Each structure stands twice: as structure tokens, then as C-alpha cells.
Image (cartoon, grey):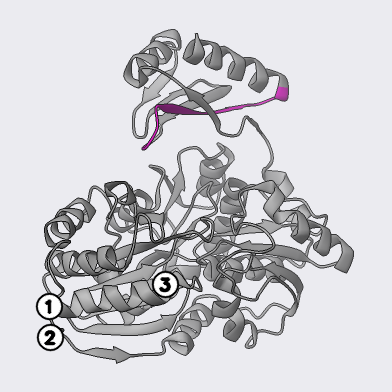
Amino acid sequence: MDDGIFKAYDIRGLYPQELDAQASGAIGRGIARYLGGGPVVVGRDMRESGIELRASLTSGLRAEGVDVIDIGRVSTPMVYFATNALDAEGGVMITASHNPGAYNGLKVCAREAVPIGGETGLADIAQHARELLSEPLPEPRGALRECDVAQRYYEELLDAFPVRPRLHAVIDAGNGIAGEAVEGLLERLPLEVTRLYFEPDGSFPNHEANPLVLENIADLQRKVVECGADLGIAFDGDGDRCAFIDERGQAVPADLMTALLAKTVLENRLLGAGPGTPIVYDLRSSRVVPETLRAYGAVPVRGRVGHAFLKRTMRERGACFAGELSGHFYFRFPSGYVADDGAAAMMLGLQTMEIAGRPLSELWTPFQRYQQSGEINSRVDDVPATLARVRSHFSGGEVDELDGLTVSFPDWWLNVRPSNTEPLLRLNVEAGSEAEMASRRDEVLAVIRG
């Protein structure tokens, strides 16, 4: 077991070099000891290595006397749903998300699908696993049962988003688990669907299941235009993220999609929204997001980057919806739990279009009021010293340190965040015009790299 598999938000590594059956068994025991009881929900995606990892993980959990509920081959959001719906003490999804087929991993959550990450228990699980790794796995004492939660999960989504869209959508599942996981939901919608790469294949033969990378959505963009479809939807490997393509084949930036979807939530009182509802957004998002939220009566709440932080902020503030630049969209579901869910985002996007009765391009482009740099990485020798240099150079702006360093001016703003794993700084700049954005971007980069 390689210590490097324990990341900020999950466990992930090459199989079997870094994460093998022995490690998975020890991690299962560590999860059981951390949670202090069960039952624990276990699901897996379509990777072949998941079969062996599931067997060893469940053996490790059961060796500690924890009952296991195996929900089979599912998306990550279905594990979150089942953890809450089955009143489980925790849940584990065996997946490496969008990583190449040689990888696998574990996403771990506690009761009510609360994520367990590096700052909230994953370090304790890692320590237990290290101590137990060399021990033979004891005989199982906990029970194992199977449970199919798919129909109950679909009902949750259909209840949350009651409009039944009569649209033509091209959906690219990227050979991940999402195609299989949403098929039963699509069957219950009056939707015309053109399917791309719905066959689950952990080797990802067509493209990586990461919709943030433009080359991975090229086939989808072409197909939308070729078919004359209303929109395109791309899922990531484990189904907790999605991206939207308009009828022209243009990718919709996730922060502008957050503004559009939030508008629908607020106007239609979805997810329990009402006057003064808090809605959370990734602090790298365009200023148009908080401006839109205020315009429709919500309380905008800036959130730290990363699903564990955004979900925690949602729970603390009682928010019903959130969006992140990575394509994660977050929901407080009718049954009370908070989770990121690509299928729910799809449902909300379809509902948005059906209600408006207008092309997606007409719905999102009015939010394109500012010019953004996109995220730019710089390798630096001394992260704290570089941040201090940026802060000093731009001392005339309004400063906050919610996540890295944000400096705001009336006509532009910057955010510089350190990477969790490398000596990198990640820069985002937004301004009112392309010329000013480029000028400010270059000025900040000169300070960072100087």
C-alpha cells in the first residue's frame, strides 16, 4: 500500500501497484474502526479491478463486525443516496472517477453522505490501515446483504424535478458508469436521447471520462450539431459531474451554468428554495453568479474549492444548491441529504430548458458579461513568499483568504490558490473586457513568476 493513495478528498492509486486487495482489506477495517459501527453501503463502478477490491473491502469491514449493504454496480451519487436512504453509518464507492483505467480508488462518506476527506477522518482511516496491513484478515463477523436502490433513487430525482422535458439530448457517458446508472431514469422521461459511449468499459476506449478537457467533448459537440439536438450532456467516469453543450455545439462554462440553474431553482421554488435562500458558489466563479443570485432573491455564499468544503458550507448555511467550476453541481435533496450528482444536474438543466421554451444558447449567453482567464498554473519555489508578494503588489484591493488569496477591485479581481499536492499556484482573473483581463493576467503572472 502506497501512502500517496490517500488524497485530500478520497483514496486513489494505480492498481495493483499502489492499491491492491490487501490494502483494500486493511482500509475496510480502518473505515469500520473510524465509523465505529455499521451498516456500511458499498458500491462500485465498471472497472474490472473493482470486483477484487469490493471483495477485499467488504471482507475488511465485516472482519470488524460491521454489516455491509452491497448495492452493486452504481454511480457515486447512488452510493450517497443509499447511505442516507438506508440509514447507514457510512458509504464507500469503489471508483477512480475520470482517472485512466489503470487506476482505482475509494470515495468514503459518513452518515447522511457527509464526505470523509483528509481533514475529516481520512487520515485516521489511513493510520488504522497502515497498522492493520500486515495482519491476516480475520474471519467475517458482520453480515452481507444485497440491495437494489435504483428505483428509489430515480423517484428522488423525479420528485425533486417534476417537469418532464420533451427535448432531444445527446448524452456522452464516456464509457463510464453513468450510462448504465441513468438508463432507468431516461426510460421514465419523454426525452429523445442520442447515446454516445454508454457501454461501461473501464479501459475508456473512446476518450477519458473527464468533460473538463475539451478534446473529451469533441465527439459530443459534433454530434449535437449533426443531429440538430437541443443540447448535449457529458458525464464523468463515476457520474457525479456533468457538462452542458448548447445546440450550437458550444460548451457552457460551469459557473455560468450555475447562474442559469440557480435562476431556475429560485424562480420555480425547487429544492425548498424561497426568499433569502442561501446558494453556494465556487469562489473562482464569475461575478455574474452572485449578481444573479441577488437579483432573484437568494443569499450568495462564496465557498472554498472542493466538494468536501462546498458540501460543508451548504450544510452549515442551509443552502439548497451549489455549483463549482469543475462541473460538480450540489443539491439538498427532498430527503434531506446534500450531494453532488450529475444526473440531478441533467434533470435540472432539462427542466430549465423545458420551462423556458428557448434554445440553451439564448439562456446562458446573457450571463457572459465578463472576461475570464481560465485557471493558469505556475510552478514556484516558495508558495507562501509568492502569495505575500502578490498581496503586497495589489495592496490597494479588497483582500480575503477564504481559499488562497483573493484580491478584488471595482473592475476586476484575482484569485491565487496553492495546489494541494504540488508547488503550484493556480491563478484566475476576471475583468470587464478582454483587453483589461489580458493586461491584469499578465501583470499578476509577472509578480508570481518574477
Residue located beneath label 3 in the image: 50
* Element marked by disc 3: helix
Residue 216, x across and y down, in percent: 68, 54
Residue located beneath label 2 in the image: 141
Task: Decide if residue 250 is in sight here.
Answer: yes
* Residue at 17% across, 64% down: 30
Q: Looking at the rendering, which quadrant does residue 396 occupy?
A: top left
Q: Amino acid at mark 1?
A: Pro
Q: Using the numbered discs, state the Cα–Cα distance from disc 1 to disc 3 in whole angstroms.
A: 21 Å
In this rendering, is residue 121 above or below 448? below
Q: Which mark is residue 138?
A: 1
Residue 209, x across and y down, in percent: 60, 59
Label whose residue precedes the other's in the sequence (1 or 3): 3
Front-most of residues 78 and 24: 24
Q: Using the numbered discs, state the Cα–Cα distance from disc 2 to disc 1 in whole angstroms.
A: 9 Å
Q: Amino acid at mark 3?
A: Gly
Residue 245 as seen in the image, left or right of residue 74: right
Mark 2 near mark 1, Cβ–Cβ under 8 Å? yes
Q: Nearer the viewer, mark 1 or mark 3?
A: 1
Task: Give the quadrant of the N terminus.
Answer: bottom left
In this rendering, is residue 386 above or below 228? above
Q: Amino acid at mark 2?
A: Arg
In this rendering, is residue 335 above or below 131? below
